[in-house]
Amino acid sequence: MSFLARTVRAMRPSMVRSYATEAAATGLRLTFAVPHQTLFKDVAVGQVNISAVSGDMGILASHVPSIEQLRPGIVEIIENAGSKKFFVSGGFATMNPDSSLNINAVEAFPIEEFSVEAIRHNLAEAHRAVNSGATEEDKLSAKIEVEVLEALQTALNTK
């Protein structure tokens, strides 16, 4: 047997994930905050779905610890009583070994507060600003606005 095979076989018991054993009893604990307000503070939830730069993901209790950068999109919080959806323009989600999830967003709004017509109008204006003869700074700002509005439009169409 090769050295590598013996080493892996000997290490296999220690490779079992064991740092979140207490998580099953307490479930997923969520803290969700924006700079001016805490939306959820250490609340037990069933699952949280986020739009991260690395891809969309669902987070349950005992999820592997990670830090994810949020992209413009939906944060869906699933509780026993139903789910709540928030649109975030960006931020970070930190999953801890104790099954606590901290989401710090730049801004977050309940998805019900948005109008499809207003988004279409604002998106058309942002596209015009990107294509206009404005300064480079204005064009970059408009491109960011287009990205956020397109993500919001997609979120509303899949609501």
Image (cartoon, helix red, strand yellow):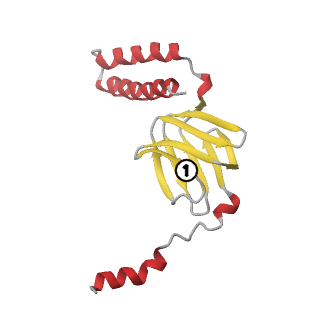
Q: In the rendering, at what x and y percent does residue 151 appear?
A: 44, 29
Q: Please, is residue 6 above or below residue 54 in the view?
A: below
Report how many numbered discs are placed on residues in the image: 1
| Residue located 68% across and 37% down the image | 82
Image quarter in which the N terminus is found? bottom left
Crowding at label 1, few (<14), some or many (≥20) Cα neighbours within 10 Å?
A: some
Q: In the rendering, at what x and y percent does residue 146 appear?
A: 39, 24
Q: Please, is residue 59 above or below residue 144 in the view?
A: below
Q: Is residue 42 left or right of residue 126?
A: right
Q: In the rendering, at what x and y percent does residue 98 appear?
A: 61, 63
Q: Amino acid at mark 1?
A: Ile
Q: Please, is residue 21 above or below residue 42 in the view?
A: below
Q: Residue furthest front?
A: 1
| Residue located 34% across and 85% down the image | 6
Q: Quadrant of residue 61?
A: bottom right
Residue position for label 1: 59
Q: In the rendering, at what x and y percent does residue 23 appear?
A: 64, 62
Residue nearer the viewer, 62 or 51: 62
